[in-house]
Amino acid sequence: MAALGDIAFLLTEVLQAPQQWQALPAFADTDADLALQVLEEAGKFVDQQVAPLQRVGDEVGCRFHAGQVSTPPGFKAAYQAFWQAGWPALSCAPEDGGQGQPAVLECVLYEMLAGANHGWTMAPGLLHGAYECLKHHGSDTLKAQYLEKIASGEWLATMCLTEAHAGSDLGLVRSKGVPNANATDGSVRVNGSKIFISGGEHDLSDNIIHLVLARLPDAPVGPKGLSLFLVPKILPGGERNAVVCERIEEKMGLHGSPTCVMRFDDATGWLVGEPHKGLNAMFVMMNAARLHVGLQGLGLLEAAWQKAHAYAQERRQMRAPLAAQGPSTIAEHPAIRRILDTQRAWIDGGRVLAYHAALQLDVAKHSPDAARRASAQRWCFQRPGLPGRQRLPAGVWRPWLR
Ligand SMILES: Cc1cc2nc3c(=O)[nH]c(=O)nc-3n(C[C@H](O)[C@H](O)[C@H](O)COP(=O)(O)OP(=O)(O)OC[C@H]3O[C@@H](n4cnc5c(N)ncnc54)[C@H](O)[C@@H]3O)c2cc1C
């Protein structure tokens, strides 16, 4: 169940998010009532449509057959309902078809989704990063063709970085993008093989937009020679592009998300951003993904706490100190209470940190005051200990420091 009461308390009382939104012209219309109404509807969608698919997602899992991936029963219908209800576009800009709501509301949505059904949530989880990457680095032509479809979630997206020999060390990437001399549309031919690609192939959306790191022919060696290419599964004319899923990986506990080995066989793609600056463009996507990976952990921790708490309330063993007669529930034993309360402190502390980061991302983007924008940017991206690192605002509760 979505923990709306706790989340609303942290947002409105602890972080005072509504006051922060009022200071940003982009969110002047978003007050506490509107935000809580959005989160309530999000909670209903998560509890009614996504959470019930958790078991089938893991027991049946994604299936691979002859290059096609089918997702578990119910996944496609839930995804179609999700994007058609406008959830992926919650914090995208109105000019791109988005609803222009604060980033922290999207964060709460994805935290609830991950706790309810991590496998299902992996598919839309990359959308916002792909949207930001294309918005900041895509050409006008690419934006006209792809931005709204990605913002709305009608088409899903992937990030194709990892190769068998290049994981943490992306400087070793060997995939190539060669300008297509015969084409008048500025396209390149992309060749190479990628592994571990989340949502590389599936039946959830009609098209899949791959953002692929590869090297142009004159590229310097190492990470500074990487360029980013947009490679759609279905080309603008409607033909299938030469992008092939070779197999899906088996992994424990996340069978609802297809982790794919992908092959690009002279696939048609287009450069995103400048040549050899692919990592800069990809970092826009990776930075969005970082916060969402943290939120996955929070969602899962909340789900685990709810189960542990419910069990502790019903399981009776021994008589607790000060209890009346007969066995007590184990929740009454101080040692168990300490475990459960420690979990809760981690959840609340993690939430404050994640939501504060999301609020600062919006300040960095939308504040009319340049100094506030710069300070928020530093808070989000500077490493601890470097000059200029801000502390949390005075009065913000810091349970993890106790
Ligand atoms: C479920 C799942 C989904 C994924 N989805 C995607 C996706 O959508 N797109 C994509 O491109 N990739 C994806 N990946 C791949 C992921 O990005 C890589 O696993 C990651 O980059 C690490 O690479 P690696 O597994 O090759 O580990 P390696 O790079 O081989 O690292 C092995 C270990 O060595 C450590 N290590 C490496 N270098 C150093 C160093 N310099 N100093 C100290 N320690 C070091 C690492 O931290 C790690 O613990 C996914 C992986 C998983 C498990």
Image (cartoon, helix red, strand yellow):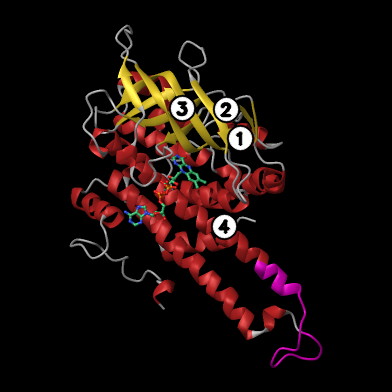
355 in relation to 283, above or below = below
> Rounded to the nearest whole Å, what is the CA distance between mark 2 and mark 3?
10 Å
Residue at 50% from the left image edge and 71% from the top image edge = 345
72 in relation to 267, above or below = below
Mark 1 or mark 2, earlier in chain? 1
> Rounded to the nearest whole Å, what is the CA distance between mark 4 and mark 3?
28 Å
**Residue furthest toward the right?**
326
Which mark's residue is nearer the viewer, 1 or 3? 3
Mark 1 or mark 3, earlier in chain? 1
What is the x, y in percent for residue 12?
Answer: 46, 60
300 in relation to 78, above or below = below
Is residue 322 one of those drawn in magenta?
yes
Do the residues under discs 2 and 3 have CB atoms within 8 angstroms? no
Say which mark, if any, is on residue 205: 2
347 or 277: nearer the eye?
277
Q: Which residue is mark 4?
A: 300
**Residue furthest toward the bottom?**
322
Which mark's residue is nearer the viewer, 1 or 4? 4
Crowdedness of circle 2 by 10 Å Cα count: few (<14), some, many (20+)? some
Q: Which residue is mark 3?
A: 209
12 or 162: nearer the eye?
162
Crowdedness of circle 1 by 10 Å Cα count: few (<14), some, many (20+)? many
Is there any visible trace of residue 394 in the rendered image?
Answer: yes
262 in relation to 388, above or below = above
Do the residues under discs 1 and 2 have CB atoms within 8 angstroms? yes
Residue at 21% from the left image edge and 32% from the top image edge = 220
Q: Which residue is mark 1?
A: 79
Residue at 35% from the left image edge and 71% from the top image edge = 395
Is there any visible trace of residue 104 in the rendered image?
Answer: no
Q: Is mark 4 within 8 Å of ligand 1?
A: no
Is residue 171 one of those drawn in magenta?
no
**SS for tag 4?**
helix
